[in-house]
Amino acid sequence: MSHNKTKMSLRNYGICIIVFLCLCACNYDDQIEVIPVKIQLIYPDNSINPYTGARVELTNAAASTFVDSTDATGTARFAVPPGIYSATSSSTLTTTDYRYFFNGTKSQIIISSDSISTIQLKLTMSKKRIVN
């Protein structure tokens, strides 16, 4: 019986060492590569100038969504992992006389370290007159 106990003890000790070595081999300091990307909203001719605050979303194949708002030039800035993305924007702008609706989608955007860093997203516009 004592021989079996010693065998079990050595076996458990061996398993503990293996588990410890596996945990030590994991490196949690690995950095995820991110790529800087700009999405430039392109408004229809003769509509409005770009404005601050339009919502832009980038969604990758794993359904992870990254969200930003545009600056005064109509550009949203992201830092995302490489992959295949779709970009969407849907916003509403209200003036004194009209409510403008802007929508745009672009699919199959490949983002990698050697891809272009600025993507143009063309928007379509519809407007509704505000009755005062």
Image: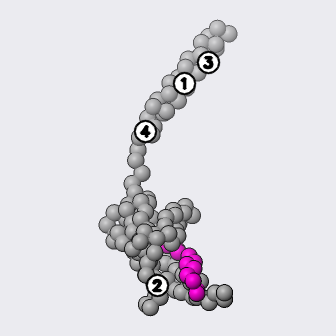
Identify residue type, mark 1.
Cys
Task: Report the disc number at residue 8.
Answer: 3
Task: Report the disc number at residue 48.
Answer: 2
Q: Nearer the viewer, mark 2 or mark 3?
A: 2
Element under label 4?
loop
Instruction: Give whichever of 22, 113 is nearer the camera.
Output: 113
Task: Report the disc number at residue 27.
Answer: 4
Q: Kindly indicate whether the residue at mark 3 contacts the one at mark 2 (C-beta within 8 angstroms).
A: no
Residue under label 1, please give it. Answer: 16
Query: How many angstroms separate mark 2 from mark 1 (CA)?
Result: 67 Å
Sequence-wise, the earlier of marks 1 and 3 is 3
Sequence-wise, the earlier of marks 1 and 4 is 1
Sequence-wise, the earlier of marks 2 and 3 is 3
Identify residue type, mark 3.
Met
Answer whether residue 55 is visible to the viewer in this image: yes
Task: Report the disc number at residue 40.
Answer: none
Q: Nearer the viewer, mark 4 or mark 3?
A: 4
Element under label 3?
helix
Q: Nearer the viewer, mark 4 or mark 2?
A: 2
Sequence-wise, the earlier of marks 4 and 2 is 4
Residue occupying the point 61% across, 18% down: 8
Answer whether residue 109 is visible to the viewer in this image: no
Query: How busy is the neighbourhood of tag 1: few (under 14 within 10 Å), some, or many (20 plus)?
Result: few
